[in-house]
Image (spheres, rainbow, N blue to C red):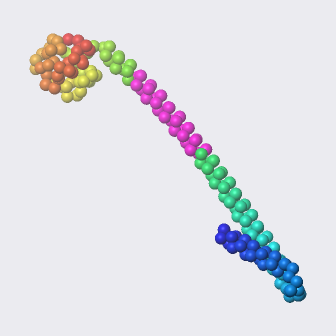
Amino acid sequence: MKALKHILALSLGLMVSNSLLAADNPADKPNSAQEKAKTSLTQKSTTLQQQSKDKLSAAKTSTEKAANVSKEKLEKTKKTLTDKGDKAKDSARKQVSELQQKGESAKKTVSAKAATKVNINTADAQTLQSLNGIGEAKAKAIIEYRKKAGKIKNAQDLSAIPGIGSATIEKISPYLSY
C-alpha cells in the first residue's frame, strides 16, 4: 500500500511539473530539448499512473478473492457446527427418552415390590434387601435375630435388632407380614 502511495505522489509531482513547463512564458521560448523532456515526463507520468491503477486493481481483486474464500469457509463452518449441534440435540433427546423409559420401568418394579408383602419370618436375605432401607448388613442382622430370638411378631420387635431404627421400621412396616 505504501508503494502505491509513493507512486501516486510521484505521478502528481510529475503532472505538476509538466503543467509548469507547459505554461506559456514569453521570455522563455521552448526549444527542442525542453520539448523532448516535457514529452518524456508526460509519458513517464502516464505510465506510472497506469501502473498505479493496475496495482490498485490487482490489490482489490486479491482482497475480493480473499474475502470470498473467507466467506465460503465461514459458511462451511456454520453448516458443520449446525449439523453437529443437530446431532447432539438428537442424541440428547434419545438419551432423555431412554432414561424416562428406565425411570418408568423402575417405578413399576418398585410398585410391584411394594404391592407384595414380605414375610419377615420366612424371607431370605435377597428378599429382605428388596425392602427400601434394608441393605445386605441389615438383612443378615434380621436373619441372625430370627435364629436367636425366634419368630418376629410385630414391627416393634425389629427395634431390638442392631442397625434398624425407628425411621427404617416406619418405611418398611407397610410392606411386612408376620
Q: Nearer the viewer, residue 80 or 139?
A: 80
Q: Quadrant of the C terminus?
A: top left
Q: Quadrant of the N terminus?
A: bottom right
Asked if residue 30 lies left or right of residue 149, the reply is: right
In the rendered image, residue 29, in percent from the top left (x then y), is placed at 88, 86
Residue 147 visible at all:
no
Q: Quadrant of residue 64?
A: bottom right
Examine the residues drawn in magenta and state their main secondary structure. helix
Q: Quadrant of residue 118?
A: top left
Asked if residue 15 lies left or right of residue 126, the reply is: right
Q: Is residue 160 magenta?
A: no
Asked if residue 106 lies left or right of residue 64, the reply is: left
Q: Nearer the viewer, residue 9 or 89?
A: 9
Q: Say above or below: 54 vs 121.
A: below
Q: Quadrant of residue 106?
A: top left
Q: Nearer the viewer, residue 153 or 94?
A: 94
In the rendered image, residue 109, in percent from the top left (x then y), is placed at 36, 20
Residue 80 visible at all:
yes
Q: Which residues are magenta?
A: 79-105
Q: Say above or below: 28 vs 96.
A: below
Tell me the residue at 14%/15% (across/down): 157
In the rendered image, residue 19, in percent from the top left (x then y), is placed at 81, 76
Residue most extreme to the front: 27
Number of dots carrying numbers:
0
Tell me the residue at 56%/44% (across/down): 81
